[in-house]
Amino acid sequence: MIWFLVQSPTKCAEYLVGQTNKFLIATKEKIADLTDETFESEKSAIRTIIAEKDPNLAAAARRVFGLEVTTHRYQFERQQKELELLETITKDEFKAYFHQMFFSADSARLDLMLTAKTHKDQQAE
């Protein structure tokens, strides 16, 4: 599951949904034109983020208790498993996954829009 939380103090919910749709379409076009070199560069950046060591004990505790214990997943080797999985992902698999998640007839989408009274006049009737 992938989810976005988009909020604005100045724009109505319909505008934000429209901008999210524009973002997804623009991203789809970028992914369609993705070169092998760019894909490997992005993987390298993600590898660096995942492999980053906890800077202190408090951060390690937040990671373990906040991610593993409170979610009842208990995957204490998550960092290493994610690094191993990252190495197996191909550009074609990534493209297919993106399409399946956001543009396939088989994917489901739920837009939940909450509108503040101050933005009510911006909403379409």
Image: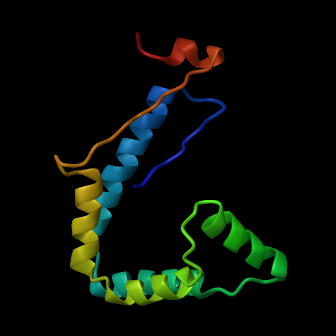
Report the front residue among 10 and 5: 5
Residue 77, given in percent of the width and then of the height, sits at 56, 84
Q: Which of the 4 image quadrants contains residue 78?
A: bottom right
Q: Residue at x 40, y 9 (%)?
A: 125
Tell which residue pokes out farthest to the left in this image: 105
Is residue 33 in sight in this rendering? no
Relative vertical location of residue 5 with respect to residue 66 in this rendering, above or below: above
Residue 37, given in percent of the width and then of the height, sits at 34, 88
Relative vertical location of residue 58 with respect to residue 66 in this rendering, above or below: below
Q: Is residue 20 left or right of residue 103?
A: right
Q: Report the label total.
A: 0
Report the front residue among 40 and 59: 59
Q: Residue at x 29, y 52 (%)?
A: 102
Residue 93, given in percent of the width and then of the height, sits at 24, 75
Q: Residue at x 29, y 73 (%)?
A: 94
Residue 18, given in percent of the width and then of the height, sits at 39, 36
Q: Which of the 4 image quadrants contains residue 8?
A: top right
Q: Residue at x 43, y 35 (%)?
A: 17
Q: Quadrant of the N terminus?
A: bottom left
Q: Is residue 121 left or right of residue 62?
A: left
Q: Is residue 76 left or right of residue 17?
A: right
Q: Is residue 38 left or right of residue 10?
A: left
**Type of colouring:** rainbow
Is residue 74 in sight in this rendering? yes
